[in-house]
Image (tube, rainbow, N blue to C red):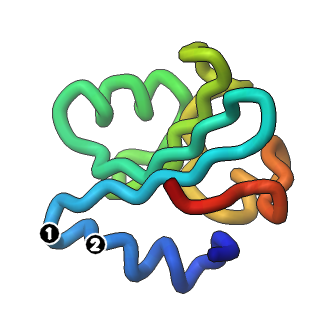
Amino acid sequence: MTITQRNVDLMGSDRGEIVRWAGPSGLRVTGVLLEGAQRVWADLAGIPGDVTTAFVVTKGGALVGRGYYASVEELAEVVDLAGLSPR
């Protein structure tokens, strides 16, 4: 599955589902709801308060770049989307 804005829109945020992708060398991308602790970390990463979902990018357990990305476009700046596969 390719990550597109449509995939994000269908992410299941109204049901609290989490979407995950894996990439090379331990890269992980997770779609998260920005509530509770996730909201706090997203605020620290500069995600606007009106954004309710984001992607968290990690590699080996550490955040990649600022860690939280509000859109597919922002995500594509730090991750090769073609190299991701659903997990």
* Residue 55: % across, % down: 52, 48
Direction from residue 73 to residue 61 in the image, left or right = left
Q: Amino acid at mark 1?
A: Arg
**Quick check: 87 left or right of 34?**
right
Rendered residue at 47%/52% (across/down): 20
User: Residue 71 — which label?
Assistant: none
Q: Which residue is mark 2?
A: 12
Residues marked 1 and 2 touching at CB (< 8 Å): yes
- Secondary structure beneath label 1: helix
The image position of residue 54, as x and y in percent, is: 46, 51
| Amino acid under disc 2 | Gly
Number of other residues with Cα within 10 Å of mark 2, as a class: few under 14, some 14 to 19, many 20 or more: some
> Is residue 42 something that shows in the picture?
yes
Rendered view: 30 above or below 82: above
Q: Residue at x 70, y 52 (%)?
A: 75
Image quarter in which the N terminus is found: bottom right
The residues tagged by marks 1 and 2 sit, at their Cα atoms, a distance apart of: 5 Å
| Number of numbered discs on residues | 2
Please name whichever residue, 11 or 60, is drawn nearer the observer in this view of the structure. Answer: 60
Residue pointed to by mark 1: 15
Check the image and report above or below for 26 versus 15: above
Residue at the image point whose x is 66% and y is 64% from the top: 72
Kindly identify the residue that appears in the image at 36 percent across and 46 percent down: 49
Q: Residue furthest bottom?
A: 6
At label 1, counting other C-alpha atoms closer than 10 Å, the crowd grade (few under 14, some 14-19, many 20 or more) is few
Would residue 51 be visible to someone looking at this image? no
Task: Relative to 6, say whether 62 is above or below.
Answer: above
Q: Is 43 positioned to the left or the right of 60 in the image? A: left
Q: Is residue 14 above or below residue 34?
A: below
